[in-house]
Amino acid sequence: MTLDKVVGSAQEAVSDIPSGASLAVGGFGLCGIPMVLIQALLDAGVDGLSVVSNNCGVDDWGLGVLLAKQRIAKMTSSYVGENKEFERQYLSGELELELTPQGTLAEKLRAGGSGIAAFFTQTGVGTQVAEGGLPRRYNGDGSIAVASPAKPVQTFDVAGVPRDFVLEEAITTDFSLVHALKGDRYGNLVFDKSARNFSPLAAMAGRVCIAQVEEIVEAGDLDPDAVHLPGIYVDRVVVVGSDIEKRIERRTVREGN
């Protein structure tokens, strides 16, 4: 295996992603979305995708462009509130949704990338997250076609107090797509601010990780202490430049000075 992981184009980088593949996709809101890779995947025509991501973008940006063309069969997300087409497909029974608490989703990705099969957490105990019954897919008439199953709950002593914890299984996917501010030819990556929230974890969870980077540097040019994700997790790097379009989910400004 070559140490130089840079490939010539986004199209080349995603060329072996088949229909029906599972993907972990980085980004937080509209920050750090690997839009060039998503567009290349859209152009490739693959469908039936199972996608794990914090959210599904908006109607015309991010994963929303794949959703609009009905390329996504299932989403595993923690927040889906900014996409009307997502709501329509979910409520009509066209899309399966596995809602997962945000911190739990992050840890499921990290655990998958770390070789941990499952873990116990207090998040979701006493709710449908643990007890089951959350609608994952609806029928066309609005009835529930598929509901989430109940999960094992176990009691542990924490500081001398018995507490219930729910067992959550780790997530691994066939591929992962992420956007980084900077990377070197060996795949070591640096993320920008809040784009770091989910991107390193999504990258870790994919068996094949594809990263688009704004800037490429030579091996050894990155300060080791500044690396957010080591290249051992990254298989392909695509250079997209810094002048790509970046959108703001909700632009707010302060009135007055």
Image: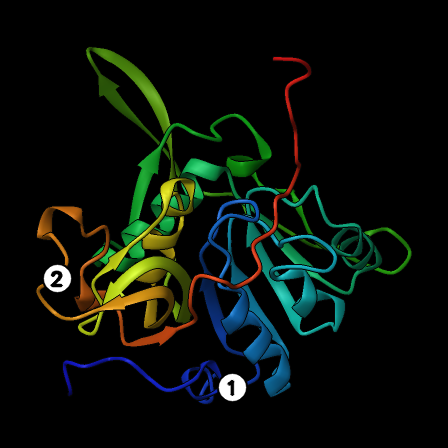
**Residue 57, how many percent across, how many down?**
63, 53
Circle 2 residues within 10 Å: few <14, some 14–19, many ≥20:
few
**Residue 141, how many percent across, how many down?**
91, 56
Query: Residue under circle 1?
Result: 18
- Report whether 89 appears left or right of 32: right
Q: Residue furthest right?
A: 141
Compared to 252, does 89 lie above or below?
Answer: below
The quadrant of the picture occupied by the N terminus is bottom left
Amino acid carrying mark 1 in the image: Pro
Circle 1 residues within 10 Å: few <14, some 14–19, many ≥20:
some
Q: CA distance from mark 2 to mark 1?
A: 35 Å
Q: Which mark is residue 202?
A: none
Query: Residue under circle 2?
Result: 221
Q: Earlier in the sequence, mark 2 or mark 1?
A: 1
- Report whether 190 appears left or right of 241: left
Taking depth in this image into account, of 20 and 83 the one nearest to the observer is 83
CB-based contact (under 8 Å), mark 2 and mark 1: no
Number of marks drawn: 2
Taking depth in this image into account, of 122 and 46 the one nearest to the observer is 46
**Residue 144, how many percent across, how many down?**
77, 51
Q: Residue at x 74, y 73 (%)?
A: 69
Q: Residue 81 lies in what quarter of the image?
A: top right
Taking depth in this image into account, of 215 and 58 the one nearest to the observer is 215
Compared to 153, does 205 lie above or below?
Answer: below
The quadrant of the picture occupied by the C terminus is top right
Q: Residue at x 55, y 43 (%)?
A: 78
**Residue 66, how many percent across, how many down?**
66, 69
Amino acid carrying mark 2 in the image: Asp
Q: Residue at x 46, y 82 (%)?
A: 14
Taking depth in this image into account, of 256 and 238 the one nearest to the observer is 256
